[in-house]
């Protein structure tokens, strides 16, 4: 879901300097030799699960963000939307586009973690020898997000066009070919700046909330599935609700919703975040910016909870495995 991505830059304890009198590692801390591969595997698995487990709700969200929906696709709530989609369009309709999401999410998340870990290490040594530099974490996270979204953005465009009601596209490949032929390569990156703009506040709110809750629920920062699930779900919900206006704008840029654009006599294709913001406001006023907020929060809560718990589990499992193989370390 784009902004709705999971844990970034590891869990609370990873990368922190242990207290001087207790040089031992926590079970959740990674041995330095395993870091890159472990983070890539954990990140890719968490990323794919996060994007797929709640995928039907993501399909509903895309439709609910439509500015001028077809009367047949006007839904009162998430459950009603899912029920009607299955009854009128078939059992598999809410899963349409899931394949392109998996294709994008795996490499995008693996790349994110590889870049994040590598840069964080190099920059931390520059800024704060042997310590954990927040500045290094911030720069590494920003560069990694640029890469993640560069991979994920085209997949998002194809996914959202397949999710729409009465979508003219019959397959992923057909959609890619048609969009490329009629709108050019740029169409796959129209929402890139909006996506990045959304990710900055999303990740900031997400991380601050997660870390805050971990301090209360899991002060030792050990592997504790319950605390990761609760903190992840709450952090995801708060960040998702706060960034919904940018998500509505992103959906409009990705789908180029025909009825909405033609009602304002917009010829050609809508591009640019400012233009999209003004289009949403003209058609829906302020409430227009919160279309689909319910679906977005419902999608995000389990997604971030799953992503954090899967990520923390893999980190714990792979670390334990590495430490068992190297008992002397």
Image (cartoon, rainbow, N blue to C red):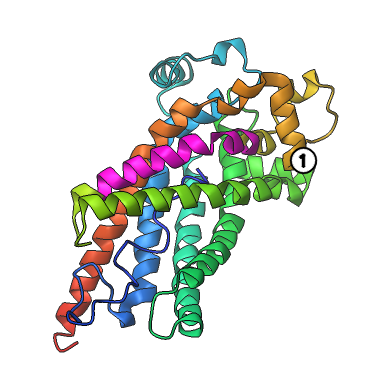
Q: Position of residue 301 (x, y in %)?
A: 36, 38
- Reading the image, the residue beneath label 1 is 271
Residue shown at the point (30%, 46%) measured from the top left: 231
Up-down relation of residue 96 to residue 223 (above or below): above
User: Is residue 124 located in the magenta-colored stretch of the structure?
Assistant: no
Residue 178 quadrant: top right
* Position above or below: 204 against 295: below
**Image check: 96 left or right of 220?**
right
Check the image and name the residue furthest to the bottom: 328
User: If the image is split into quadrants, where does the C terminus sit?
Assistant: bottom left
**Direction from residue 261 to residue 290 in the image, left or right:** left
Which residue occupies 25% across, 76% down?
18
Kindly identify the residue that appears in the image at 73 percent across and 45 percent down.
187
Q: Can you tell which quarter of the image residue 95 is in?
A: top left
What is the crowding at mark 1: few (fewer than 14 residues within 10 Å), some, or many (at least 20)? some
Residue closest to the eye, 28 or 327: 28
- In the rendered picture of this protein, how many numbered marks are placed on residues? 1
Q: Look at the image and tell me whether residue 170 can be seen.
A: no
Residue 99 drawn at (x, y percent) = 48, 45
Front in this rendered view, residue 52 or 203:
203
In the rendered image, residue 243 lying in the magenta stretch gets the answer yes
Q: In the image, 80: left or right of 232?
A: right
Q: Is residue 129 visible?
A: yes
Q: Which residue occupies 77% across, 40% down?
A: 271
* Magenta span dominant secondary structure: helix
Does dot 1 land on a helix, a strand or a loop?
loop
Q: Is residue 189 left or right of residue 2?
A: right
Q: Position of residue 289 (x, y in %)?
A: 60, 28
Q: Position of residue 90 (x, y in %)?
A: 44, 21
Q: Which residues are magenta?
A: 228-250
Q: Single out the residue that lies furthest toward the top.
A: 71
């Amino acid at each position: 879901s784009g902004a709705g991505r999971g844990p970034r830059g590891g869990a609370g304890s990873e990368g922190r300097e242990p207290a001087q009198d207790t040089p031992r590692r926590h079970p959740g801390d990674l041995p330095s030799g395993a870091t890159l591969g472990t983070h890539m595997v954990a990140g890719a698995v968490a990323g794919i699960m996060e994007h797929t487990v709640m995928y039907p709700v993501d399909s509903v969200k895309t439709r609910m963000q439509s500015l001028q929906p077809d009367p047949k696709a006007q839904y009162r709530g998430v459950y009603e939307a899912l029920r009607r989609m299955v009854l009128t369009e078939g059992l598999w309709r809410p899963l349409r586009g899931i394949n392109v999401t998996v294709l994008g999410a795996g490499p995008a998340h693996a790349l994110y973690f590889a870049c994040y870990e590598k840069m964080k290490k190099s920059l931390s040594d520059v800024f704060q020898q042997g310590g954990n530099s927040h500045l290094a974490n911030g720069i590494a996270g920003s560069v990694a997000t640029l890469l993640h979204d560069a991979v994920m953005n085209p997949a998002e465009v194809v996914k959202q066009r397949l999710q729409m009601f009465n979508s003219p596209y019959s397959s992923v490949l057909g959609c890619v070919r048609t969009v490329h032929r009629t709108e050019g390569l740029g169409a796959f990156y129209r929402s890139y700046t909006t996506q990045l703009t959304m990710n900055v506040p999303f990740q900031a709110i997400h991380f601050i909330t997660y870390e805050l809750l971990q301090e209360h629920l899991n002060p030792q920062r050990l592997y504790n599935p319950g605390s990761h699930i609760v903190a992840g779900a709450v952090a995801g919900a708060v960040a998702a609700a706060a960034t919904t206006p940018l998500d509505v704008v992103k959906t409009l840029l990705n789908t180029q919703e025909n009825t909405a654009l033609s009602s304002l006599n917009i010829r050609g294709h809508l591009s640019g975040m400012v233009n999209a913001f003004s289009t949403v406001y003209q058609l829906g006023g302020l409430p227009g910016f919160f279309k689909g907020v319910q679906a977005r929060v419902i999608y995000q809560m389990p997604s971030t909870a799953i992503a954090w718990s899967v990520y923390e589990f893999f980190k714990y499992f792979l670390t334990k495995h590495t430490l068992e193989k190297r008992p002397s370390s």
